[in-house]
Image (spheres, helix red, strand yellow):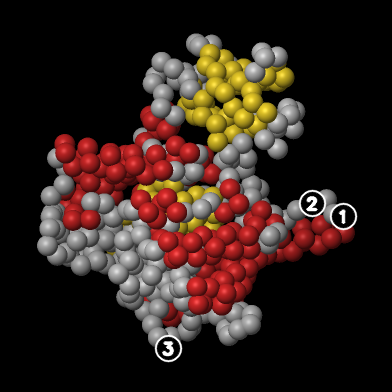
Amino acid sequence: MRKTFLKNCIRFLYTSLLSSFCLLNGTISAAEPMREMSSMEIVYDMKVGWNLGNTLDAWIDGLTDLTTETCWGNPYTTKAMIDMVKQKGFKTVRIPVTWERHFGEAPDYTIDEPWMDRVEEVVNYVLDNDMYAILNSHHDEWVVLKASSKDEVTDKLTKIWAQIAERFKDYSDYLIFETLNEPRLYGELQEWSGGTPEARQILNEYNLAVVNTIRSSGGNNAQRHIMIPTHAATSIDAAQDDLVIPNDDSRIIVSQHTYWPYNFTMNTGNGATDKWGSDSDKEECDLELDRIYDKFCDRGIPVVIGEWGSINRSNTEDRAVHAGYYARAARERGMLPVWWDNGYPGPGGDGFALLDREAGEWFFPSIVDSLIQGAGNDTTKAFRQMFHTSEQYTKLKIYSGLIGYFLPAASTVSLSIFTMQGKNVFTSKSDVKPAGYHTFSLPTNKVSSGNYIVKLKSERQSVTKNINITK
């Protein structure tokens, strides 16, 4: 605790001094650096994640102080816990936060300063470990998807997010914002079946309002990578199909919660099974993840599987097989799997926990090891899948103002752009690049709007692709 406190003091003093210098000179920003990485690249770099569940998102009626963090039975979060997660091989921590009961009345809805400070402290535990942190709005169930309350909810939601965005605006792109957790029609027939067209449209409006609030808040938030959910974060077709990417923003990531297959991962009623791992199980898993990939990733829209996992049915071996295969299959499609850990190991019910936070040990080391190993696939295999290539060929993928390409072996690369009549309008040649996935920004400042042919040439072969450049 003392080390973190001192580090936060240093961060504050450093930022304050730089901010003062900025006011005098107008030339230096106190913001931490943002890398020139697309959201697709960021998601792949996040590798594999773990949820700090049932902690900062815990709540009880009438309790409004910092003790809400432990009111669902989990211990106070420490840097040592996050260190363990890092040491095991996780690179991302999702930090669910329930803001309700921690902010004041209208019209300002001011967030309690001690609560904001505590949230920032936990975020810094993650970032100080060179890990990614996902910060969201979790059990804020006042966000109802009804036209009658839409204006009131939008006002409250944007004012809450304006304060969060202001507090974290100078943080680097290792911090990801997530607008909402599982916004849905609470208690209604369509709660978990994709919602209604009206509810999905209202959710689109909420996502847009929050994204606009974050983008306009200054600092690094104009470029921050932001996650948005479908209705209930479900991967049901209707919810996916009606999701609108706010402003066609190229730094938006879709949040999906995929407790799949349901009968194995969380069902405790009829049809539940403690077995998983047959060839047909794996084929069905591939088909399901291919479906999500085709909906989003293949269109250049990255996906974070913000929650997934399996409950403890005294079936550790099957759970380990499932964890490893699912993590591997998600990563091969460029998606980030983030295990839901709620602190309760089971058996049965909601027993998703992997980390024993009290003892500083892992409840199920074989599951964790299988998960980490499954997610540890090399970039070559993952992006060969993402870009539909084989080891013998390089193919182009164009999305969000970037030209993505895969090299099966180290090589120099030249990239040229031609008009449809064959006139060369742009050429760039690189130094030797390693095998793997790379991107090149479309030189929209050097060519006019219109249709073109892109030619990528490596030492082994060349490929071309038609593109349309708009400004």
Q: CA distance from mark 1 to mark 2?
A: 7 Å
The mark nearer the N terminus, 1 or 3, is 1
Q: Residues within 10 Å of mark 2 (few under 14, many from 20)?
A: few
Residue at 59% across, 18% down:
455
Disc 1 marks which amino acid? Answer: Asn
Q: CA distance from mark 2 to mark 3?
A: 45 Å
Disc 2 marks which amino acid? Answer: Ile
**What secondary structure is found at the residue carrying circle 2?**
loop
**What secondary structure is found at the residue carrying circle 1?**
helix
In the rendered image, is residue 116 in sight?
Answer: no
In the rendered image, is residue 195 in sight?
Answer: yes
**What secondary structure is found at the residue carrying circle 3?**
loop
Q: Residues within 10 Å of mark 1 (few under 14, many from 20)?
A: few
Q: Is residue 217 left or right of residue 37?
A: right
Q: Name the residue carrying label 2.
A: 28
Q: Name the residue carrying label 1.
A: 25
As drawn, the label of residue 62 is 3
Q: Tell me which corner region of the image, top left, top right, bottom left or bottom right, holds residue 353.
A: bottom left
